[in-house]
Amino acid sequence: MELTVTAKSYVRDLFCMADKVDVKASVAEGMVSLLPGESIVLHIATGNVDAMLLVNVELGDPCVALLEEHEEMPVLAIADASVVGNLPSLSSTDADAVRQAVRYLYDLGHRQIARVSGLESLAHSYIRDSAFADVATELGMRYRCLHTDYTPETGSEATKRLLAFPEHPTAIIYDNDVMALAGLGVAASQGIKVPEEISIMSWDDSFMCTAAYPNLTAMGRDVVDTGKQAAGLLLKLIGGERVGHLMEEPYELRARASTSPAPAAE
């Protein structure tokens, strides 16, 4: 994203990353990124920035309504169109990707699966959770979903809880790569073989997925290209062009050594 915007001579004062902020708080002039507790209102009023990028949108997020009221501030939401009102948005195909991942495990013979999700308040978590429950129910699979804060510590704790059930899942889908790696560690510490006894999948591919042993199956996409696309859309908005609700390229299921047929199907 930085390469794209600096090529257009926007080095500073381009956009704010608005993420769970307090719209009434104050912030020193000249800031170009919003941290929790900082104010969108001040940036709009002072003209400190030329555009805003809204990320990690929550269900009923007050930032959405505020930014809808201030049409003078170009803003792009990285979120599903269903939760951003009239704001321009760039969405990922979360629900379709979840269905693809679950059906992949179903075809491998897995009938008891789990999802280690992120924060329940985030809109994309809700979308993924709903799709996960829907497709698992449709296929007659038993499923569990635990929520975390995306850290390896909470990923480990969720894995321990899932493996403590007498009939634990034979496959777990993690909402990021670091939690999937933590899940690998928990399985190893308990003497559970991956993928012979349990399959593990990561959401969003990374070099860590290919560096892990066994290599992690992952739902992948080109995040660099997404950043370039988002930056290009911001520049269009700054230039006065209209931008609607756009979709990223679909996720790709990248099957690797961490998934295999369920034990009962062997």
Image: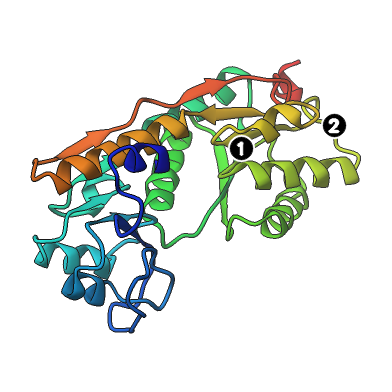
Identify which residue, 149 or 264, lies in the foreground. 149
- Report the residue at 37% width, 70% height from top: 31
Q: Provide residue 56's location: percent of width, then percent of height.
A: 39, 56
Q: Is residue 91 visible?
A: no
> Dividing the picture into quarters, in which one does residue 92 lie?
top left
- The residue beneath circle 2 is 193
Q: Few, some or many C-alpha atoms within 10 Å of disc 2 (few <14, some 14-19, many ≥20)?
A: some
Labelled disc at residue 113:
1
134 relative to 232 in the view: left or right: right
Residue 243 lies, in percent from the top left, at 14, 40
Q: Is residue 12 above or below residue 25?
A: above
Point out the image quarter for the C terminus: top right
Q: How is the image coloured?
A: rainbow
User: Is residue 31 something that shows in the picture?
Assistant: yes
- Coordinates of residue 157 in the picture (x, y in percent): 73, 58
Comparing 218 with 233, the one in front is 233
